[in-house]
Structure formats: C-alpha cells, structure tokens
Image (cartoon, rainbow, N blue to C red):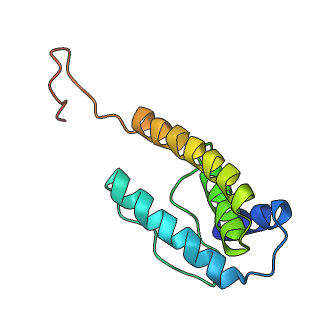
Amino acid sequence: MTARNAIAEADKLRPNAIGEEVKAGWLRDLDMELAETMQVTPPEDKWPEDQDLLMPEPAAQVYVYWLCAMIDWAQQDMEQYQIDQVMYDSARAQAAAWWRRTHRPRVNMDGSRWMP
C-alpha cells in the first residue's frame, strides 16, 4: 500500500479537512515504530511523492485504521477514536502475527538456527 492509497481510504471513511502532509507524517511515525519493532530499516521518506509503506498486503489495513483513529483524535471525536483504536490494535496484532509467520528464521531439525 502506498501513503496516498492509505490517505485516500481513510478520507473516504472519515471526511476531514486535515492536510495530506499531516496524515503523511502520521503514517511516517507509524512506519518508524513498525520498523523498530520488526528490526528492519524503515522506508525512505519521499513525501510529497507517493511512497510504499513498510507493511504490505494483507497487513496494510493497519495504516487505514491508524489514520482513522488519528483523524478522529484530531477532530476531538473521542468516542469514535476509541472504537478506531480498538480496530487499529486488532489490525496491528494481526500484522505482527503475519510478520512473524512470514519472517520466521529457518531452523534445523534439532531446533538450532539454519545457516547457509
């Protein structure tokens, strides 16, 4: 998913007057946090050019839920923010599980790490 795709999806769900640059900053913050958690290098910040976000499909919905929560927070809709935060937390847990499944280190039959 790209930053512009995530922003467009979130804007459909939560019409708002918040600038794309602010939303791109929120996405960048999330990507930095995810990269640190996953122990990978975060994607280069290319804004305002369109850029790929770190988490690919099927885990990329985490970005849309994050933006929805941040939009509601900025608009002081705390009730909707709390709902969005639960959705984000669930999507993030699913994204983390996907990451662990797809990036699991290879192991030998004895349980030691496989070395090429």
**Residue at horizontal 53%, vertical 46%?**
92
Q: Quadrant of residue 70?
A: bottom right
- Judged left or right of residue 55, residue 77 is right
Q: Quadrant of residue 4?
A: bottom right
Whether residue 57 is visible, yes or no, is: no
Up-down: is 109 above or below 87?
above
Residue at the top extreme of this rendering: 109
**Residue at horizontal 60%, vertical 52%?**
62
Across and down, in percent, residue 11 comes to 80, 67
Up-down: is 115 above or below 92?
above
Across and down, in percent, residue 103 comes to 38, 39
**Residue at horizontal 19%, vertical 30%?**
114
**Residue at horizontal 57%, vertical 69%?**
27
Location of the N terminus by quadrant is: bottom right
Q: Quadrant of residue 51?
A: bottom right
Whether residue 12 is visible, yes or no, is: yes
Foreground of the two, 101 or 70 = 70
Up-down: is 1 above or below 97?
below
Across and down, in percent, residue 108 comes to 20, 21
Location of the C terminus by quadrant is: top left
- Judged left or right of residue 99, residue 27 is right
Foreground of the two, 76 or 45 = 76
- Judged left or right of residue 80, residue 33 is left
| Labels in figure, total | 0
Foreground of the two, 115 or 49 = 49
